[in-house]
Image (cartoon, rainbow, N blue to C red):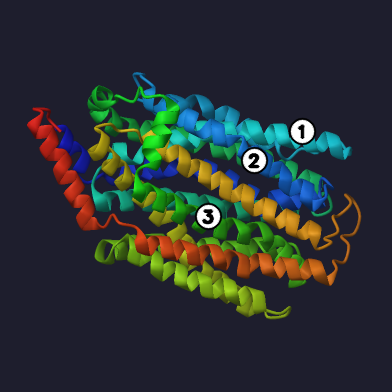
Amino acid sequence: MNNHSIQTEKLNFWTKLAYGAGDLGPAMCVNIQVFFLLFFFTNVAGLPAGIAGSILMIGKISDAINDPIIGVMSDRTVHPWGRRYPWMVFGAVPFGILFFLQWIVPSTNQSFLFWYYVIIAIFFNIAYTVVNLPYAALTPELTQNYHERTSLNSFRFAFSIGGSIFSLVLAQLIFSMFPDNPIQQYLVLGIVCAIIAVLPIYWCFLGTRKRTLSVNKKQEEDNNTNLPIVEQIRVAFNNVPFLFVIGIYLCSWLGVQLTASILPYFVINWMKLPESTFPQVAIAVQGTSLTMLFVWSFVSKKLGKKAVYFMGVCLWIIAQAGLFFIQPGQVGFMYLLAIMAGFGVSTAYLVPWSMIPDVIDLDELNTGQRREGIFYSFMVFLQKVGLAIGLFLVGVALDIAGFIESVPGETPPIQPESALLAIRVAIGPLPTVFLIVGLLLAYLYPITREVHDEILLKLRERKEEEGVRF
């Protein structure tokens, strides 16, 4: 069987399942960060909201250097396991350890805590990149089929969202076991999630490597990616559809992260519901997202990726706007809006990640090289930037609005009206602005299914003319 038929034939269920499992651990860890880390800093570690938001921002800014370097290094890796797997296999355990270390409160001194959490954030982000970037870059190596890539990402984000839901259920269970000891709650949550997160990475490696190794030799022959990193970045950013994809993804992910990071404050401080209610609201969003992944994947085969994104995000915008106007006591309406938001959140996961392999094919057509690592490095970077900006904006907004941080061991304070308004703005109008920009970029995105088919045809013709079996 030639290389082209291997790359375009349908993937079997077990390969897709193993590939999807690879995102379970990173998704669990990121989800716990998104929903709990800012709250942990302010209400458990006792840090002011502005400082708490800055910690995550500093950690993510460091990735502006780390992500493209690791992306290029993974492109250039030559190993019997292929380009991506050594990074995943050897980075998994440090990834789990560093995640756990985020949830320790080693001191009551705020200066010490600030530097401790900044250092852990920097090294955790490196470990996350080492594991997740090469994993994400497996998608175009597993298949070049336009619809199979969407299907493959459906499995990936089924595990991703499933892991997110599981992490919230786990958090609720652990919190109920230690109701009066928040430090113990997060310590146990950190170590349990760290252990669970590492194991599926090895499942992904064992379950997909046969497929990727079948085309690995060909990829090594084509892997002429010895350009300097700065030059590779320049080439990537000259790819106009890539600029649209990263814009769509950043806007979508900012919408997700802003909502997620402010949600516990919204549920507890504005809606005046018990802390145990917050994971249930988050599960309503994530559960809907999980259910809709395969629905959107099916619709995408009929109508295309752009149409799916439009349908999902329009519902999402309505939900975000509704959250601003909702009043305490309207609990049923809150859950309805959470479910509506889930329809759109699933497209934020599925569509941009399904677009990026098509952009890589265009880059190969334009340059004659395949450089998945450099493209995926920016996607992983933007994922972390979205989280950082979301946490930073929320932290700064709460700080300016006079949010009163909790003192460990004492009753949480009553928040002023200015802080409550900031919470509502952060969960309603602010994410809505980013989502509208994302819709505009999606409308302008130039690679349709027909355009992608033409790209693959030209690539095949080039290989045939060169006498290479593609």
Disc 1 or 3, which lies upstream in sequence? 1
Crowd around label 2: few <14 · some 14–19 · many ≥20 (10 Å): some
Asked if labels 3 and 2 touch by Cβ distance under 8 angstroms, the answer is no
Kind of element beneath mark 3: helix
Crowd around label 1: few <14 · some 14–19 · many ≥20 (10 Å): some
Above-or-below relation of 328 to 120: below
Q: Position of residue 270 (x, y in %)?
A: 75, 71
Quarter location, residue 237 = top left
Alpha-carbon distance for marks 1 and 3? 27 Å
Q: Position of residue 312 (x, y in %)?
A: 43, 68
Q: Amino acid at mark 2?
A: Val
Which numbered dot is residue 116? 1
Q: Residue at the spot x=80%, y=54% of the render? A: 179
Q: Amino acid at mark 3?
A: Trp
- Where does the C terminus fall, quadrant-wise? top left
Which numbered dot is residue 200? none
Quarter location, residue 136 = top left
Quarter location, residue 101 = top right
Q: Position of residue 431 (x, y in %)?
A: 58, 64
Q: Residue at the spot x=88%, y=62% of the render? A: 413
Above-or-below relation of 2 to 36: above
Residue for badge 2: 192
Asked if labels 3 and 1 touch by Cβ distance under 8 angstroms, the answer is no
Q: Amino acid at mark 1?
A: Tyr
Alpha-carbon distance for marks 2 and 1? 21 Å
Q: Position of residue 223 (x, y in %)?
A: 29, 25
